[in-house]
Image (spheres, helix red, strand yellow):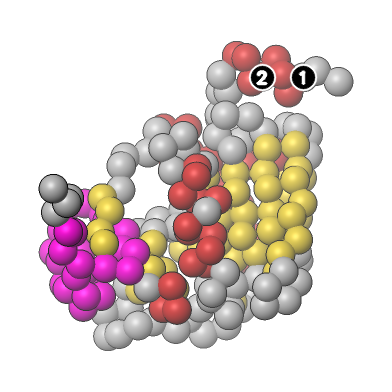
C-alpha cells in the first residue's frame, strides 16, 4: 500500500494562512513546516547579534530586522524566518503587506539541535538563490563558534570559521566587526563545551 500523498499548497495559500496564524511556519515548494520554539540561549544570542549590528550600522544605508520578518527565496520556492536579516539600500517586499523581504544582504541563523541540518542544508541552498545575499552566518549556541560564508560568485561561497570567546566576527560585506564577547553576552555554555573551548 502506498503512503498517502501530501497535499501541496500554493505560495498564495501559504501567505493567506500565515498572516492569520498564531504561530510561524516556513514554506518549501508547497509544503508547510511549523517552527518550534527557541531556547532562552538561542533567543539571547539572536538579540545580541541584532542589537550589535543595529548599533554599528546606525545612520547608514543598512537596516537590521529580527525573526518576525519573512524572507522569500523565489527561485527555491521557499519562505523562511531568519534570526537576523540585514538589508542595505531600499528594502524590496513581495506585496503591499511589507512582511516578506526579497533582497537581504546578510542572513544570520543561530543553530539549534533540531534545525542545524536544515540551516546548513536545505535552507542555505535556498538562500544561495537570492542574488542580493552576500553573507550567510551560522552561530553556535553551545560554544563560542561562528561560521561565516561569503559569496565569491554565483556558485562559490568562502567559509571562514571563528572560535573562542575572545574572537571577533567581521561582517565583510558590511565593514563592521562584532566581538564574540558581545555576541555571547549573558550566555552560559554547557560545562563540557566550555571546558573544550578552553583547551589550547
Q: Nearer the viewer, residue 52 or 99?
A: 99
**56 to the left or right of 104:** right
**In the rendered image, the vertical position of residue 145 relative to residue 161, given as above or below:** above
Q: How many marks?
A: 2
> Which of the labelled discs sits on residue 109, or is there none?
none
Point 56% across, 19% down: residue: 190
Looking at the rendered image, the quarter that the C terminus falls into is top right
Whether residue 191 sits left or right of residue 43 in the image: it is right
Q: Is residue 158 visible?
A: yes
Residue 63 in view of the camera: no
Looking at the picture, how far across and down is residue 32, in whole percent? 25, 59
Question: Is residue 134 part of the magenta span, yes or no?
Answer: no
Q: Disc 1 marks which residue?
A: 198
The structure residue drawn at horizontal position 76% and vertical position 43%, both measured from the top left corner, is: 162
Residue 188 location, quadrant: top right
Question: What SS does tag 1 mark?
Answer: loop
Image: 44 above or below 135 = above
Residue highlighted by disc 2: 194
> Residue 30 placed where, x, y %?
26, 68
Is residue 167 rendered to the left or right of residue 73?
right
| Residue at the front extreme of this rendering | 1
Give me the residue at 46% from left, 63% from top.
Answer: 65
Segment colored magenta: 5-30
Residue located at (30% from left, 48% from top): 35
Give residue 147's position: percent from left, percent from top. 68, 48
Quick one: SS at disc 2? helix
Rendered location of residue 43, percent (x, y):
44, 40
Q: Are marks 1 and 2 in contact (CB under 8 Å)?
A: yes
Q: Quadrant of residue 135?
A: bottom right
Residue 18 sits inside the magenta stretch:
yes
Q: CA distance from mark 1 to mark 2?
A: 6 Å
Q: Residues within 10 Å of mark 2 (few under 14, many from 20)?
A: some
Amino acid at each position: 500500500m502506498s503512503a498517502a500523498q501530501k497535499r501541496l499548497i500554493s505560495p498564495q495559500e501559504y501567505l493567506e494562512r500565515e498572516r492569520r496564524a498564531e504561530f510561524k511556519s516556513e514554506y518549501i515548494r508547497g509544503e508547510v513546516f511549523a517552527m518550534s520554539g527557541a531556547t532562552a540561549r538561542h533567543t539571547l544570542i539572536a538579540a545580541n547579534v541584532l542589537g550589535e549590528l543595529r548599533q554599528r550600522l546606525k545612520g547608514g544605508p543598512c537596516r537590521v530586522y529580527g525573526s518576525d520578518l519573512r524572507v522569500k527565496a523565489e527561485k527555491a520556492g521557499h519562505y523562511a524566518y531568519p534570526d537576523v536579516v540585514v538589508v542595505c539600500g531600499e528594502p524590496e517586499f513581495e506585496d503591499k503587506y511589507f512582511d516578506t523581504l526579497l533582497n537581504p544582504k546578510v542572513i544570520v541563523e543561530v543553530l539549534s539541535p533540531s534545525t542545524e541540518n536544515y540551516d546548513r542544508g536545505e535552507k542555505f541552498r535556498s538562500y544561495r538563490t537570492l542574488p542580493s545575499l552576500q553573507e550567510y552566518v551560522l552561530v553556535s549556541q553551545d560554544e563560542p563558534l561562528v561560521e561565516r560564508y561569503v559569496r565569491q560568485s554565483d556558485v562559490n561561497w568562502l567559509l571562514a570559521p571563528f572560535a573562542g570567546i575572545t574572537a571577533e566576527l567581521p561582517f565583510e560585506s558590511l565593514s563592521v566587526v562584532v566581538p564574540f564577547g558581545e555576541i555571547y553576552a549573558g550566555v552560559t555554555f554547557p560545562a563540557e563545551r566550555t571546558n573544550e573551548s578552553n583547551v589550547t
